[in-house]
Amino acid sequence: MIPAPSIRFAGRTVACLACLACHALGVAASPAIAQEPVLLERIVAIVDEEMILQSDLELAIELYQLDRQLAGAEPEPVTPELRKQVLTNLIENKLIIAAAKQNEMVVEESEVEARVQERVDQLVEQYGSLEALERALEQSQLTLEDFRFRYGTQLRNQQYLRLVVGRFIRPGIEVMANEVEQYYLDHLAEMPAEPDSVTLASILVRVQPGAETRRLVQAKVAAAQQALAAGRDFADVAREFSEEPNASRGGRIGAVRPGDLFDRALDQAVLGLQAGEISQPVISARGVHLLKVDRVEPDGARVISQIFFPIEIGDADRAAARQRIEAARDRVLAGEPFSLVAAEVSEDPASAAAGGLMGTFQLDELSPAFQEALAGAAVGTVTEPVEVPGGYYAFQVVERFEGHRYTYDELKDDLRRYVENQKIEVALAEYIDELEGIFFVDIKP
């Protein structure tokens, strides 16, 4: 894929231009306005007779910051350097579009609109509802329509860029095999490596709430189930009984796929339901869940809602779980087979049924706490208990595999694409410089 500049937006027409036209013709609504003109808009650049307005630049900066927010990054300080970079990319976009249109290249608007809607649907799922997405956009002082406009513009710009690169840049790019191999040798220290892997068995002891806490939660679950059995709508019961933030939305969570939920028991419960069905109570590390599948999407994703009751865990409950996992570990260290202790004690049903065997994992995919516990652990070693939000794990290292740096033959296809993209970037920069000599560009101070 062609590495594109990090910020690419296009401008949009601003109604204030009409006000500027009136002012230029000497038309004024009142003597006060005529005596004290107010600057309503400013032109920051002109490209091929198209204006880039101050409002276009400000919007592009806001949308760049929104991109960072949606990606989980902090906003950048709005420095003169950032403004210059955003303006440069606005100008480059207009030059590319001018070149594409001069050569009668066309972007299919229906495809752009479809991809915009697809992205909005993905974000609605990510945030849980359309209202939650709109609230997130409001934090950047943007509307959903602003976002649709921005994303459509970005897709359109990318498509024009692909068309121009495909016709004028890529045909002149040649990558030789010896170039790719030399790049590998010159950057050997930077080449990716397969990390160490371990095959693990585990014993999981969950933190269990005290008897009184269990009694109170069971009573709440029973009341909700009774309301559902009486025929009440799931969303109404969720609003009345559920004890989580999305209760006001009828417990709606959104679309989930296998692995999306934080607990395997929840995943299995959801996958076992058809549209309209409600689960039996499911216990997770957080509490008790009543799950409903509202509908099943064509791709298999399930749109779900839930009624949730948190389980409060105290220090005494956690201490009791710690004692149970230490007792299980002591049995293994005393000579009992790990598989037998895991099958008897572990509260992870899937691995307990396999004698605690979990599978093989790359170390860098595991959580920092797990990596620390397993660092240097030899085959057969049983780790100290590792605390997790819902309880404690003790791991046994069944097998250990050393990682290795990938060879040239394993990487050559990816490296060839990378070298080609580097050449395309250089050629594209030179092409844009040529466009600046063909099309009129005027950057205002």
Image: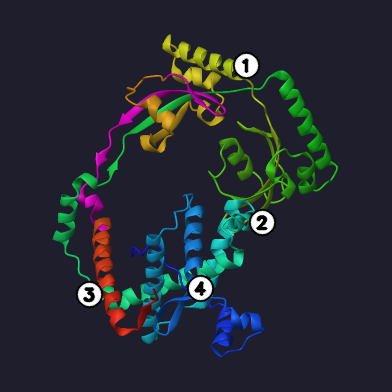
* Mark nearer the viewer, 3 or 2: 2
- Counting residues from the N terminus, which is met first, the one under dot 1 or under dot 4? 4
Vertical comparison of 414 with 84: above or below: above
- The segment highlighted magenta reads 384-413
* Mark 1 → mark 4, Cα distance in angstroms: 59 Å
Q: Name the residue that disc number 3 marks.
A: 172
Which three-letter amino acid code belongs to the residue tagged 3? Gly
* Mark 2 → mark 1, Cα distance in angstroms: 41 Å
> Looking at the rendered structure, which numbered label has been put on residue 316?
1
Q: Residues within 10 Å of mark 1 (few under 14, many from 20)?
A: few
Residue 92 falls within the magenta-colored stretch: no
- Counting residues from the N terminus, which is met first, the one under dot 3 or under dot 1? 3
Which three-letter amino acid code belongs to the residue tagged 2? Glu
Q: Is residue 238 left or right of residue 27?
A: right
Image spot of residue 280 (x, y percent) = 71, 37
* Mark 3 → mark 2, Cα distance in angstroms: 49 Å
Asked whether residue 122 is in view, the answer is: yes
Q: Are marks 2 and 4 in contact (CB under 8 Å)?
A: no
- Counting residues from the N terminus, which is met first, the one under dot 3 or under dot 2? 2
- Taking the spot 50% from the left edge, 21% from the top edge, the residue there is 342
Q: Name the residue that disc number 2 marks.
A: 131
* Mark 2 → mark 4, Cα distance in angstroms: 26 Å
Vertical comparison of 202 with 52: above or below: above
* Mark nearer the viewer, 3 or 1: 1
* Mark 3 → mark 1, Cα distance in angstroms: 71 Å
Q: Secondary structure at mark 4?
A: helix
- Taking the spot 51% from the left edge, 62% from the top edge, the residue there is 62
The N terminus sits in image quarter: bottom left
Which three-letter amino acid code belongs to the residue tagged 4? Glu
- Taking the spot 72% from the left edge, 38% from the top edge, the residue there is 243
Vertical comparison of 420 with 11: above or below: above
Q: Quadrant of residue 161?
A: bottom left
